Image (cartoon, rainbow, N blue to C red):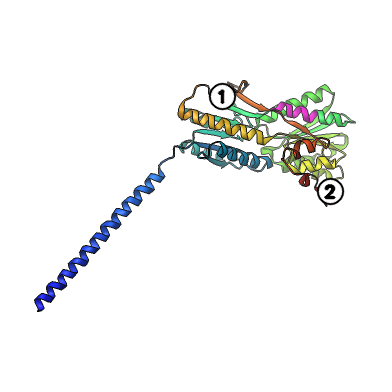
Amino acid sequence: MKKMYCFNRNKKIISILSLLLCICMLLTSCGKEQKQTVQQEEKPSDNLLIGLCFDSFLIERWQRDCDVFVSSVKEQDPEAEVNVQNANGDIETQKSQIRYLIEKGADVLVIVCIDSDGLGDVMNEAKNAGIPVIAYDRLINNSNVDLYISFNNERVGTLMGQALVNSGLENNNVLMLSGPTEDSNVAWVEKGFRKVMEDNSVTIKDCYHAPGWRSEQAAEYLGNHIEELDDVDAIMCGNDDIATTVFRTLSERRLAGKIKTVGQDADLEACQRVVEGTQVMTVYKPVEKLAQNAAEFAIILGNNKKQEISEPLENVKDTIYDGTFDVPYFYIDPVAVNKDNIDDTIIASGFHTHDEVYLYENE
């Protein structure tokens, strides 16, 4: 009986060990299957990858541009991926981010450059990788980008100058607080503005370029040259962010409204000042239209990289000289916004609401 018991016990042990072995084999098999699944998920997708690199989001409008661009891409191609990078105003960071997007295998790059002359080396790297580039709002010089999409920036300056002349300049003296010279648009805006001043015999007392579009630098300059305001009728502000700091500086000295200002971008505070009468005009640039068109062009160029379509931008008829090359140029005309047409432009388009713009009426 003892032998029979031992035999039965050994048989049970063998059965248990066999069962455990089977379980281990099953687990190992599942592990391999799971590992293979993970590896398969890690493989790069065939979906369109758009690299979108911004200067920064310090300027109010850039976040709006970004949101509209991404949503427009998703509407046109729900499977497309938009990889958004923010360089925070640092050119070396922007170069690194562009290289990252190149290494990631972007099908097209859309870039709001920090320095129009500072991206030549990474643009060559993108070209060598066969990746098309769209210069968004700011031209990238000497780089033969596949498309430059922006507004008519010389027209922006013309509208600024004409608004000041029409408002009446008693002493025919103005001050310019502009953006950085690294931004190619600044030169175009100034060209339009200076031409209007010259045609109307208005003297530009001084011109200051705020580094990196930092409005506090413009305010500091104004504070250090406050005596120059004695015979200045108006200040041309490079954008509405600068106009806001200028307004605050003037308000401290009870000069707001007495010294006229203009700006661009139709920032909310600027629109509020326009209806209050403390800013003559802001230039409205319909960024929704710009971002929507840029998204469409990005999808076309990105798919062209995959499919090699000849002349993908055949509907873009204009060109602009980047210092070396004539590159395709798509532009949208800006609109001068004053208190007489702000309802029909800013509010009617949904850029800002009536309650936001006419805030003082609700207080």
* Residue at the spot 49% in from the left edge and 33% down from the top edge: 107
Q: Which mark is residue 313?
A: 1
Q: Nearer the viewer, residue 298 or 165?
A: 298
Residue 91 spot, x, y in % from top left: 58, 37
Based on the picture, tell me whether residue 159 belongs to the magenta stretch: yes
Which residue of the protein is positioned furthest toward the right in this rendering?
Answer: 170
Residue 79 spot, x, y in % from top left: 50, 40
Sequence order check: which comes first, mark 1 or mark 2? 1
Q: Is residue 105 above or below residue 331?
A: below
User: Which residue is under mark 2?
Assistant: 361
Q: Nearer the viewer, residue 151 or 358?
A: 358
The answer to whether residue 212 is left or right of residue 276 is: left
The image quadrant where one finds the N terminus is: bottom left
Badge 2 crowding class, 10 Å Cα cut-off, few under 14, some 14 to 19, many 20 or more, is: few
* Amino acid at pointer 1: Leu
* Amino acid at pointer 2: Glu
Q: Is residue 301 above or below residue 37?
A: above
